[in-house]
Image (cartoon, helix red, strand yellow):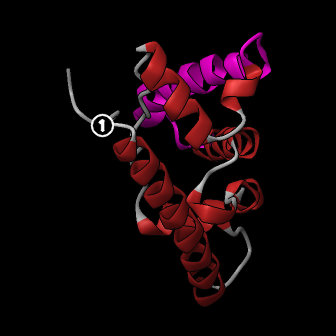
Amino acid sequence: MMRPFQASLKPKGDVELSQYLAGWKELLRFLAPLGSIFAFATSEAFSKVTALEARVRGAQAAHYASLGTMAAWERRAGLPARLALLALPSRDRLLQLACPGSSEADARAALARAADTLEDVYNRTQGLMAGHGLLRLA
């Protein structure tokens, strides 16, 4: 799950969208077995990932190579971009799902590495969106 997110991190703080979307798809696959409590959030996130993938592969693909190019393009074109917020399961369930068969210490270490990567991706995403004025609510 973390490889695409790690691969999405471009130099100079940008985020490459095709890898970012691949990371989200893996995250959604990870959350799917958690049951109906996540159904609304994963359904909404899946819809947004699907819509963004259509843009990454569509006629305007050049404007959707990275989060930076997307934010600049959508800002100029007057098209706002929104991200789904997903909650996480309990610690024990997360450890069991993330690292089946691993000791708690190994699973916690793996999740700490994953959290560091996700934090970097999130911070870059927020910074790029804020830099283009796309975080203000209408």
Q: Quadrant of residue 106?
A: bottom right
Give the residue at the far top of this rendering: 59
Residue 45 within the segment the image draws in magenta: yes
The location of residue 93, given as percent across then percent down, is 51, 61
Majority secondary structure of the magenta segment?
helix
The answer to which quarter of the image holds residue 46 is: top right
Residue 27, given in percent of the width and then of the height, sits at 63, 46
Q: Quadrant of the N terminus?
A: bottom right
Work out whether 77 lies above or below 73: above
Kindly identify the residue that appears in the image at 69 percent across and 59 percent down.
Answer: 10
- Residue 47 drawn above or below residue 65: above
Given the current orientation, which residue lies at the most extreme left position? Answer: 138
Which stretch did the figure color magenta? 32-60
Q: Judge from the rendering whether residue 81 lies leftward or rightward of residue 3; answer left or right.
A: left
Q: Residue furthest front?
A: 76
Q: Residue at x 43, y 31 (%)?
A: 41
Coordinates of residue 85 in the picture (x, y in percent): 39, 40
| Depth order, front residue of 48/26 | 48
Query: Secondary structure beneath disc 1?
Result: loop
User: Nearest the camera: 28 or 94?
Assistant: 28
Query: Where does label 1 land, which residue?
Result: 135
- At which x and y percent is residue 15? 63, 50
Point 65% across, 20% down: residue: 50
The amino acid sitting under disc 1 is Leu
In-image side of 49 versus 19 (left or right):
left
